[in-house]
Amino acid sequence: MKISTKILSLFIFIITSTTLSAQTNDELNKEVEVIKDYQPSISDAYKISSNPVIRDTNNYTPSFLYNIYSSDIEIDKNINHFPVVKLSSPPRTKSNTGYAKAALGNALTPYGELFINTSPARNTDFGVHFYHFSSRPNIKLNNEQKIKAPYSNNMARIFMKNYFRKSVLEWDINYKRNRINYYGFPGDTTAYQKHKANSEQYNSKQAFNNASASLNLHNINRRSNLDYNLGLQYNYFWNNTGQSEHHAKYNGILTRRYRTHQLSLHTSFNYYLKNGIEHNFDSSLSDHQFFNAKISPEYHISKNNFELKAGANLNTLINADSTFMWHISPKIFFAYHPIKGVMTVFAGTDGGFKHNSYSSMVNENPYIDYNTDLKPSEEVIQIYGGFKGKISRRLSYLIGVNYSINQNEALYYQTNKIYPDSVVFNNMFTPVYDDVNRLKFGGKFRFSSQRTTIGMEGNYYIYNTDSLSKLPHLPEFDAKLDIAINITDKINITAGASVIGKQKGYVINMPGNPLLSFAPSIPVYDEFDLSMATDISLGAEYKYSKNMYFYLNANNLLNQNYQRWNGYNQQGLLILLGARIAF
């Protein structure tokens, strides 16, 4: 009986050990794929900058593929006697901590940039960045008149990172100053000369200043189930004509991870105080305040070949006159990976308020009437979908479609004031609002190899408005191409091309005194064709020594006299020759 009991116990032990071993092997042999959160984004109409953009010829695009295989390596246990070798101290290597760039170009164009980042410390990184670019071109308008249109861009920045055991604190102090002239004028030479004296804004100077400070705290502990990214920011924006805006902002993202899913909460609060700007509700010039709050809860689950994010956008806007607006829209993202790593099919929805702050308005159109306060616009809902993936290790793509329903979207016109003995032209832009539904088809492609990187993107648009039939500055298509080639270890070449399709510009003729019998009772539109804008740039850099580089940049190679905004012809060919020193 005892022998039978021992045999039975031994049999149970063998079966249990085998089962546990099988379970252990199953756990160790599982394939795990880490999927990073992906939010598809097809950029809005690519806007060619009002001023030339300096393209850096240094483009580093790391591309690597690695696998880790764990296995035991047999080692022969033999003792080999080697002769004594005296080792010297290894050579010291020091990474670059900054650079200085300087260049000169035609049209009296100086360019300078200084970037300094302290050597990486254990707990702190600190740096400063200064930038200046200015030019004084003579620009030919459509009426063949040549005028001076100087401009300049300046920036000074201090930044720091403090590393803690589980988090990083980043702070940033920034100052920017951009100067322009209101020089644009659509029309013939006769009208130009006639209205030159009458228009107070003609060729007058303007400067936009923005001072900001920000703090950001986010965790770096990947073992924690709670992720956080919290930020505070303050902006003070002012110009030379007396308008100003204070903007305080809080933005936070909290994410709680579980084994198979996660919960996120995105919150943001914005407070605005505007001074000396005509209120968009009551046209008063008194100081007025604005408050915006957004809360977006979200649930995220990923299983097998499927990924789902489901949530909502909850927005409120409160104006100084107690005007209250609210918005609710679904925020959904669904992805299916039929071939992991090769193809992903996605679809989703989004929406929310867009508070058109004074600083963001000027950034979009610097020639807008400086006394304007844009109304907030609303994206009632956005529906998008498409697919993305890789054709090969080096070629990736994204193709998508996007449909959005927008309310109170600003469209920019110019105006003529008709008086008994004259017509006064305003060469700044005035917003007219309408509901605009936009259908967009877009795509992006990127090729990357050891020495060559090519990126292409393009969009085609279809617009539908509620009341306006004349839509200014809305192109049917836009496209962009960027190329970077390392010809040798010492020579780098970059090239870029930006295209915006044909657009329309409109001038509204308004009666200066509505009591005059001969004044028109309804606005009359003057229509202008803005031809397709093509901007091609080319850059080359030569490495003279370990730390010394020489470069040549050329913008608007076709010397096109295109217009981004009606009447504002852009600077022609600009060539910069300069040097860069790394230290």
Image (cartoon, rainbow, N blue to C red):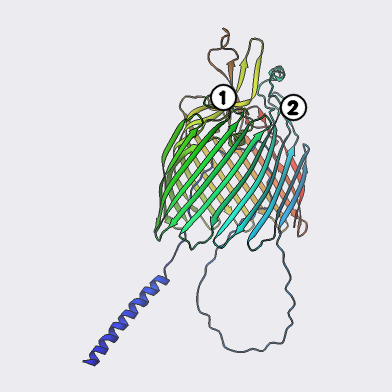
Tag 2: amino acid = Lys
Residue where numbered disc 2 is placed: 146
Residue 229 at what x, y percent from top left? 52, 52
Say which label, 2 or 1, has the lower sequence index: 2
Marks 1 and 2: in contact by CB < 8 Å? no
Q: Secondary structure under badge 1?
A: loop
The part of the image, by quadrant, that contains residue 556 is top right
Q: Residue at x 74, y 82 (%)?
A: 86
Q: Which residue is mark 1?
A: 284
Is the residue 198 above or below the residue 318 in the image?
above
Q: In the picture shown, does residue 43 fall above or below 512?
A: below
Determine whether the residue tagged by mark 2 lies in a helix, strand or loop: strand
Crowding at mark 2 (Cα within 10 Å: few <14, some 14-19, many 20+) = few
- For the point 71% across and 41% down, which residue is it? 154
Instruction: Locate residue 131, reporting x and y percent.
Output: 71, 45
Query: Can you say which quadrant of the picture contains the C terminus?
Result: bottom right
